[in-house]
Image (cartoon, grey):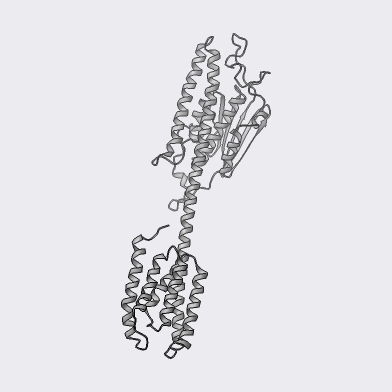
Amino acid sequence: MRTRPRWTDRMLPLVVGAVQVATNYGAQDNQPERLPVDPLGVALLLAGPLALFWRRRHPVLTLAVTLVTMIVFVSLGYAYGPIFFSPAIALYRALVLGHRRTAWTAAAATYAFFLVHTTWLAPVPSPGLWHSLAMAAVMGVLLAAGEFARARRERRTERERTAREETRRQVSEERLTMAQELHDVLAHNISLIHVQASTALHLIDDHPEQARTALATIKQASKDVLTEMRSVIGVLRDDAPRSPTAGLDRLGELVGRSGLDVTVETAGGVRPLPPGVERAGYRIVQEALTNARRHAPGSSVAVLLEYGARELLIRVTDSGAPRIPPAGPDGRPAGVPGGDSGGDAGGRPGGDAGERLGGGNGIPGMRERAAALGGALTAGPFGPGFRVEARLPIPEPVRDGRTGQDAAASVPARAPGRTPEQMQGTSGRTPGRTP
């Protein structure tokens, strides 16, 4: 919250003190029945303004000092007028700083004192009802101004607090998003590198050409993971985009380097989606392919993207039954490394589908992504294989008031990396590559 410069805290009491002393001589000229100021009166005229030095740190004490000096000054018979300046400032400041009960009580007590003083204690006749009403009106205006300033100050403080909390929340969400993106990028690509490295080690002696293919896949995967990590970490720069760039337009690249036999089918009205939906859809497919490669290497995978009017359906289903390649010299199928391939003792690559629900952050992470957008995700065994199905809501497009069309209509229908069949909304298939 903004604060006034410090020089005003020092200058205001000095100015008020000088004004009270200087203008009091004019006031006593118009009140011949009151006593002229003497050294004690001048000291009382300066005591209240001096107390204003502590009006911010100790507003209640400042209010008490200024009121006491005013009451003593008036009770001794000095002239009315300038002595009221410092109590008015102290009363206003106490209200602004939130001491409402103290301020209102002090105002009521001061008004009662003046009624008693002018009616019974003053050496001159009572000024009458109009004087009492005018004094009440002045005090009421002062209290109303203080209440208004206090309310504005509290609203401003609340807005600033809300803005700080929103900033912290956005920073936390960006950190969580970056952590999730890094997890997905690393989990997918490191898993692919592990599988291909195991294949290369197994084939390098007897089938060097096949090993060369696996090493080329490792090279490309390592390049991709470095590129994606730079993209994610790059949001830390002030001039970088505030969201990672992965989207469904890069699904063809993801399928191509997955190391699985993948077919991609699209249905419905294919169109550009909000960045959050695009990124979540890409990561869900990526994690599902990683899950399939880890637990059912060699299986075939079918990916369905169905663009509905209000939601995007993503369905990734693997067969759970790997294709058996020709046997190698050692009797094991070529391309299936021994020992660390993820298979069990009975030759089932990666175990059965039920084991995929047991641990790791893959499926919970996919559920979190879907839930963050208001959608839902289910994952579980499907026949001999496994199926991941996500439904992501698509926000209703905003209509352009000038053209009457959806704002998305001005975006080119074809996104980079998609086939013409996909962009026309017809079913298209994109075969994946096998190592």
Residue 376 location (% of width, % of height): 61, 41
Which quarter of the figure has residue 391?
Answer: top right
User: Which residue ends up furthest to the front in the rendered image?
Assistant: 39
Q: Nearer the viewer, residue 346 or 251?
A: 346
Q: Nearer the viewer, residue 313 or 106?
A: 106
Which quarter of the figure has residue 13?
Answer: bottom left
Residue 7 location (% of width, % of height): 33, 62
Q: Nearer the viewer, residue 284 or 346?
A: 346
Give left or right: position of 142 versus 190.
left
Residue 263 location (% of width, % of height): 56, 27
Compared with 85, 268 (above or below) is above
Give the residue at x 50% y 29%.
Answer: 252
Give left or right: position of 85 versus 221.
left
Compared with 81, 319 (above or below) is above
Give left or right: position of 376 versus 55.
right
The mark tally for this picture is 0
User: Which residue ends up furthest to the bottom in the rendered image?
Assistant: 125
Give the residue at x 45% y 29%.
Answer: 226
Residue 74 location (% of width, % of height): 41, 81
Q: Which quadrant does the N terminus fall into?
A: bottom left
Compared with 187, 61 (above or below) is below
Residue 21 visible somewhere in the drawing: yes
Residue 431 visible somewhere in the drawing: no
Give the residue at x 46% y 68%.
Answer: 61
